Amino acid sequence: MSRVRLLSDTLASQVAAGEVIERPASVVKELVENSIDAQAQAIEVMIRRGGISLIRVTDDGIGMDRDDALLCLERHATSKIRTAADLATVGTLGFRGEALPSIASVARFRLTTREKEAVAGTEVIVSGGRIETVRDGGEAPGTQVEVRSLFYNLPARRKFLRSENTETRNIEHQLNLQAIAHPGIGFSLVRDERVVFQLPAAKTLRDRIRDLMGNELLARLLEVEPAEGELRVRGFVGQAGVSRASRAQQFVFVNGRAVENPVIGAALKEGYHTALMKGQFPVTFLFVELPPAEVDVNVHPAKREVRFRDPVGVREAVVTAIRKTLESDRSSWQEQFRAPSVPEIPLVRRAEPVPPSNHVAQPNFPVEIGGLATTGDRFSPNEERRPVGEHHFRILGILNKLYVLMENAEGLVLVDQHAAHERILFEELRRRMEEKGVPSQRLLLPQVIELAPRDAEWIERNLPTLQKMGLGVEEFGRHTFKLESLPPFLSGTEPARLLQDVIDSLKSASNSSSPLRLGEEMIAKTVCRHAVKANDLLRQPEVEKLILDLLDCELPYCCPHGRPTMIQISLGELEKKFGRKM
Ligand code: ADP
Ligand code: MG
C-alpha cells in the first residue's frame, strides 16, 4: 500500500511558515522588506498587543496590479529573481517568494494594493491560507498588509509566543535594524494607538542614528574610516569603553541586510580587544559591503545568516577597520586637554585640613608603584592650570586614594589611577614585546615547577611567547619546567603562582590567537595585575607623569580590560545637576 502523499498547498505553506515566521517580529521583517524592495519612501507599522492581535504595514511603494496581488500569495511566486544566475547576484532583500503565502496561511490576512497610475486598487482577504474575498479597493497608491490573530490556527505555535512586551521589543529591534540600514526611508511605529517613533527620511546614516538613538549615544560613536577596495567596511562604532551587556546595539549589515554572523561577531571582539570589557558587546552600526558573488545569502529561510566565500578576508577587513577607527580617536581625546580657554573661577575649592580617606585627600606618605619614577615632594595641587607638557589641565587632588581629580577646559575629569597605570604599562610592555622582548632579571634561586600534563603541553607550545614576555622558562624533564628569570617589575611575585596564573588565564583565550595576541592577553590578564597595586599613593609629579603617559597611549580612555580610565564631567553637566541650566 502506498503511503506517500502530496501535502495540500495550505499545509505546505504552514510547514514553510514554521521556518520563516517564528514570531510577530518575523512578520514585520518580511513585510517591511517587501516595502523596501517596492521602493517605498515611507513605511508605517502599526501593532496591537505585541503584534499578536494586529500587525499592519503600509507603504507608498510601486504597488501591484490585480494579477500580481493574487499571484504573490502563491508559494514560490516572486518578481525578484528568475534564474539561478539571478540568485547569485540578488540585490533585493527578498527572493524566495515564501513570505506572503506563509503569513497568509497562519493568520487572518488582508492585502490592499494599488499601482501609482491605476484608477483602482485591489483588496484581497485570506484566512488560514484560503482566499475569501477579492474586490476593488480605493486605498492610496502603495501597499498595505494587515495581519490579524497570528497563529490563530496553530495553537502550538501560539503557545510559544512570549509576553506582549517581549514581542514588542523584538518588533522594535527589527524596525531599528531596517531603519538603520535604510536612512533614506521614513519609518514610523505605532503601538496600541501610541506613537513609539516617527523617523523622517534622513540624508545620512549619522542623522538616522541621532533620530533613533539620540545625541548622547551619537557623541560616543566614531565614524569608521572607509577603506577602498572590493570589500568595504563603513558605518559607526562605539568609542573604546562604550559597550553593552547584550548584542542589542550591535547592528551589523552585509550588503544592506541585517545579519548575525559569527565571523563578524568574532572580528568585532578582536578589533576592540582591550577596549572591551569582558562579557560586554560593542555598540556598532557596521556595514560590510562586498560583491554579491562573494556572499551567499540563501543559507537561512529568514536570511538572518550569510556565508562568506572568503571569511578570513572579511574578518581581517573588519578587525583592521575597528582598530584604525579606535586609534584615530586618540587625538580628539587629547584635544580636550589642550583646549586653550581657561574659565575664571576654579571649579572645586581646595579641601579643608587633611580629612580621612573617602574624601579629597592629600597623600601624606609617598609610596612607590611599579614602573613610575618617584621624585620630589608630597602631593600638593598646583594653583594654576598651567601647560603640563603641551597639555592644559590642573590636578586638584586625589579622592579615596584612587581617583585623580582634574580640571580641564571642558570641566571636571576623574581618572582611575589604577586603570590608567594598567593601560600605560600594558602599552609599554606590548611595545617592548614587539620590539625585542621584555627585559628579564635572573632569579637568585631558579624555581623548578611541575605541571599537570595538559598545562605542560600548553607551556611547551607557547615557550617562545613566554620568553618574549620576559618569563625565562625552560623545559626541565617530563612536565617539569625551570623558571630562571622574570621581568623586573614581577620580581616580588611568587614564581610558581605566577606561572599557574598565566596558564589559567590564557589557556582558554589562546586556542586561535597568534603569538602576538597571546602576548597581549598575557600582559593584560596577568602581568598587569601582578604589577599594579590599587590604593597606592602618588606624589604630585608622579600623578602628572601618569596623566601625561596616559594621554600618550594609543587607547588612553580605557584600561586593558576595557574599563574606562577617565570620566569627563562637563561644565554643562554640572550646571544641569545644580539646576543652573535646564
Ligand atoms: P519575495 O519578497 O521573496 O519575492 P514575498 O512572498 O515576500 O516574496 O512577496 C512576493 C511578491 O509580492 C514579491 O516578489 C513582490 O513582487 C510582491 N510584493 C510583496 N509585497 C509587496 C509590496 N509591499 N509592494 C509591492 N509588491 C509587493
Ligand atoms: Mg518578501
Image (cartoon, rainbow, N blue to C red):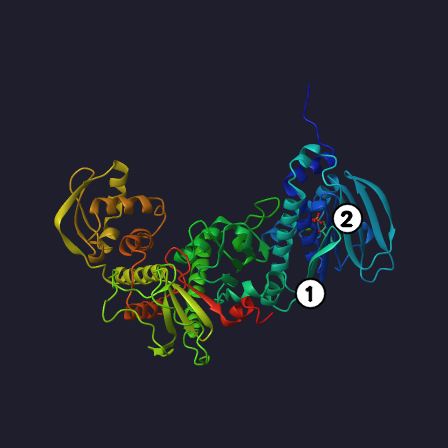
Image x and y of residue 552, in percent: 34, 69
Q: Between disc 2 and disc 1, whose residue precedes?
A: 2
Quadrant of the rendered image containing residue 121: bottom right
Q: Label 2, on which residue? A: 146
Q: Amino acid at mark 2?
A: Glu
Quadrant location, the N terminus: top right
Q: Secondary structure at mark 1?
A: loop
Task: Indicate left or right for 300 with 41 as reference.
Answer: left
Image position of 456 with respect to 336: above or below:
above
Residue 116 location (% of width, % of height): 80, 62
Tally the marks. 2
Residue furthest toward the left? 444
Tell me if I can see residue 232 in this picture. no
Residue 39 percent coordinates (x, y): 70, 60
Residue type at mark 1: give it: Pro
Gap in Å between the C-alphas at discs 2 and 1? 23 Å
Q: Quadrant of the C terminus?
A: bottom right
Query: How far across and down, in percent of the image, does residue 115 sit?
Result: 80, 58
The label number, if any, that marks residue 200 in the structure image: 1
Viewer-side label of 2, 1: 1
